[in-house]
Amino acid sequence: MRLYAQTPARRNRQVLADLIAVGLMAAAVWFALTVHDAIMMLAEPGRRVESSGDSLASGLSDAGDAASNVPFVGDLLKKPLRSAADASTGIADAGQSMQDAVGQLATLTALALIVLPVAVVLLLWLPARLRWIRRSITLRRLFDAPGGADLLALRALTGPLGDLAALPTPAGGLADAWRRGDERVIGELSEVALRRAGLRP
């Protein structure tokens, strides 16, 4: 299986198209990761809220434990401090939820920014490459098969006429020579058909 053409002009176009396709996909991934990092910066307030809530909850809990040691009113003082510590834990949880939401948004955005451009590039580039590979395999098998050169010569005769102008024209014309089974003309015409596909005999 041949991935690239044998003729320089066609091969250079294929390599350039492959490099452009890979470059576009790499650029899409880089851009998506950059956007992901930018969105994740929005999670910083959530981290601060969570940190502040945890610190406040820890401080109030320690204050409640200390207040419980006060004679007579220790339990009365401890109860509101514990309630305030629980409320601070709720604030920390809200900060964590904010971070989770920002993380999910960043991930989904990055996935969309990767999947959509890569899918478009693949749809525009990959079918043409696969078509050329399949066609080159078919033409090569046809050329190597008995009578295949004759069919390739017919393909050359029915294609664009510009490639045929360079061939020496026998008496009666190329088509007549092909009908007569002139091996030299059939060989030249089959080479033209292969060259059109970027292959060499």
Image: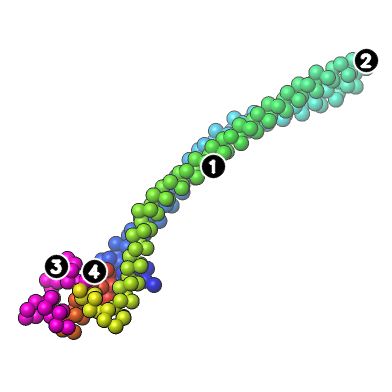
Can residue 80 be spotted in the picture?
Answer: yes
In this rendering, the answer to whether 67 lies above or below 37 is above
Q: Quadrant of the N terminus?
A: bottom left
Q: Secondary structure at mark 3?
A: helix
Question: Looking at the image, is mark 2 or mark 4 nearer the viewer?
Answer: 4
Q: Quadrant of the C terminus?
A: bottom left
Q: Secondary structure at mark 1?
A: helix
What is the distance, in whole Å, between disc 3 and disc 2 at their CAs?
A: 110 Å
Question: Is residue 163 one of those drawn in magenta?
Answer: yes
Residue 39, labelled with which disc?
none
What is the three-letter code of the residue carrying label 4? Arg
Asked if the residue at tag 1 contacts the one at tag 2, i.e. Cβ–Cβ closer than 8 Å, the answer is no
Magenta part of the chain:
155-181
Q: Residue at x 76, y 21 (%)?
A: 84
Q: Residue at x 23, y 69 (%)?
A: 196
Residue 107, labelled with which disc?
1
Neighbour tally class for label 3: few under 14, some 14-19, many 20 plus, Cα within 10 Å: few
Instruction: Name the N-terminal-most of marks 2 and 4.
Output: 2
Q: Please give the residue where the numbered disc 2 appears in the rendered image.
A: 72
